[in-house]
Amino acid sequence: MQRAGLRAQVGYRKPRAPSGEQHVVTPNRLERQFDPLAPNTAWVTDITYIKTHEGWLYLGAVMDLFSRRIIGWSMGSRITKELALDALLMAVWRRKPAGKVLVHSDQGSQYTSHDWSEFLSAHGLEGSMSRRGNCHDNAVAESFFQLLKRERIKRKIYATRDDAKMDVFNYIEMFYNPKRQHNSNDGLSPLEYERQYFNEAKSRLLK
């Protein structure tokens, strides 16, 4: 849990799934193993909300636990399975993992949908889910949302959803991934930590 960081600042209530819809729930295969030894071993994903004068903006994010890098994200005015899938699609497109990746989420209706399960299978990903009502099983993903709200949003209410989207994009891609230092990364940013890993791996191959 040392690398997990701070607990989430706030949570949110997920909308109830339509009656009669069947859920696909997978075991907690991650089991709070938050320190994988290589990239594309374990990803975590979650959804949070951001307040604007136009209504809520929802942010879905996918993080590689190895470096804490946000490798996929999606934003929209509704909390839907498409929001979750778009974030995961970006992660797959960016990373193009060669082997099986564990993808951990909570048991929200977005992640227990058949579309989510089918996407995982189609892309060689293995699902993992937190135990119901146990936020600590996905502590690292929630910790990222706390950093976003503490370091960038700072309780502000954005005028529009587009304003919020731009600010969140800038935080993730211009600050958090390339510059935000982490104790879990030996004081390096997510991008720097991954670069160091691949440089060291290349050096070993050349010996």
Image (tube, helix red, strand yellow):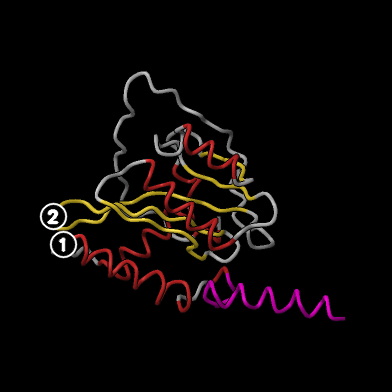
Up/down of 169 relative to 133, above or below: below
Rendered image quadrant of residue 203: bottom right
The residue that appears at 37% across and 49% down in the rendered structure is 47
Sort mark 2 into few (<14), some (14-19) or many (20+) by Cα contacts within 10 Å.
Answer: few
Q: What residue type is labelled 1?
A: Thr
Q: What stretch is highlighted in magenta?
A: 185-207
Q: Quadrant of residue 193?
A: bottom right
Kind of element beneath mark 2? loop
Amino acid type at mark 2: Glu
Q: Name the residue under label 2.
A: 54
Helix, strand or loop for the magenta stretch, by majority: helix
Residue 116: give x, y in percent of width and height: 48, 39
In the image, is residue 197 part of the stretch drawn in magenta?
A: yes
Q: Which secondary structure, mark 1?
A: loop
Q: Residue pushed farthest top?
A: 20
User: In this rendering, would 74 be left or right of 44?
Assistant: left
Q: Is residue 75 above or below residue 15?
A: below
Up the image or down, 158 lies above or below 117; here it is below
Which quadrant, please, contains the N terminus? bottom right
Q: What residue sits 54% from the left and 45% below the top? A: 104
The structure residue drawn at horizontal position 65% and vertical position 55%, both measured from the top left corner, is 41
* Dots 2, 1 in contact, CB < 8 A: yes
Quarter of the image for residue 173 reads bottom left
**Residue 160: assigned label:** 1
Is residue 180 located in the magenta-colored stretch of the structure? Answer: no
